[in-house]
Image (spheres, grey):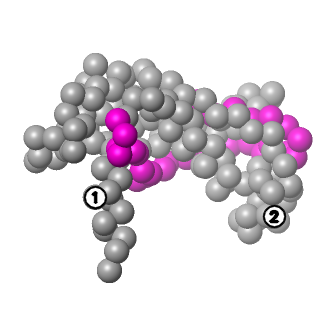
């Protein structure tokens, strides 16, 4: 287990002692519908799974890997997504995303992600999320 600490701080409102195991896995499933298409997202002109929706599915898988691992008042937020969208997936087809924790650096957690449908690999890449104290994070949104 790798301890997660805030950079330059001895703790992050009680986060001290939280440990993340490399290899943690999470999964997210979706049946592609009309609202998930490139047309609906405005990211293209074809009725297939949009890249923005695919990215959201990868984020959901990473979040699932962290389920029940973070204390109350602490969450993870997206920081970076690197994805190669390799194959189209039509409406009605189920896709599954898997995220595997590969690297921990301070509060940054990097997951490898893969998305598959019945034909095989649809997308692959990395998702980096940062562990934050919700109250302190939301303070940054206030004027």
- Residue 30 lies in quadrant: top right
Q: Please state which of residues 108 and 112 is positioned toward the viewer in this rendering.
A: 108
Q: Nearer the viewer, residue 19 or 83?
A: 19
Marks 2, 1: nearer the viewer = 1
Residue 15 location in percent, x, y? 24, 37
Q: Quadrant of the N terminus?
A: top left
Q: Residue furthest bottom?
A: 143
Mark 1, secondary structure of its residue: helix
Labelled disc at residue 39: 2
108 horizontally vs 6: left or right:
right
Image coordinates of residue 68 in percent, x first then y, are 45, 29
Q: For this view, does 95 lie left or right of residue 110?
A: right
User: Where 133 sits versus 23, above or below?
Assistant: below
Q: Residue at x 54, y 44 (%)?
A: 59
- Farthest front residue? 72
Tag 2, which secondary structure? helix
Mark 2 and mark 1 lie on one chain; the one further toward the N terminus is 2
Residue under pointer 1 = 136
Residue 86 at x, y = what percent? 68, 43
Q: Is residue 102 magenta?
A: no
| Real-space CA distance between mark 2 and mark 1, rounded to the nearest whole angstrom | 37 Å
> Residue 124 sits in which quadrant?
top right
Magenta residue span:
71-98
The dominant secondary structure in magenta is: strand
Count of marks overlaid on the render: 2
Give the residue displayed 31% in from the left and 66% down from the top. 139
Using residue 22 as the reference point, say whether residue 64 is left or right of it.
right
Q: Residue at x 37, y 40 (%)?
A: 72
- The residue sitting at 81% across, 39% down in the picture is 31
């Amino acid at each position: 287990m790798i301890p997660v600490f805030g950079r330059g701080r001895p703790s992050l409102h009680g986060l001290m002692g939280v440990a993340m195991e490399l290899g943690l896995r999470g999964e997210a499933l979706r049946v592609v519908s009309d609202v998930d298409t490139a047309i609906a997202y405005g990211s293209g002109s074809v009725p297939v799974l949009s890249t923005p929706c695919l990215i959201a599915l990868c984020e959901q898988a990473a979040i699932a890997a962290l389920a029940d691992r973070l204390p109350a008042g602490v969450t993870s937020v997206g920081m970076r997504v690197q994805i190669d969208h390799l194959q189209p997936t039509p409406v009605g087809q189920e896709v599954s995303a898997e995220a595997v924790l590969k690297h921990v650096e301070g509060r940054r957690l990097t997951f490898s992600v893969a998305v598959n449908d019945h034909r095989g690999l649809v997308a692959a890449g990395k998702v980096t999320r940062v562990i934050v104290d919700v109250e302190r994070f939301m303070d940054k949104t206030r004027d």
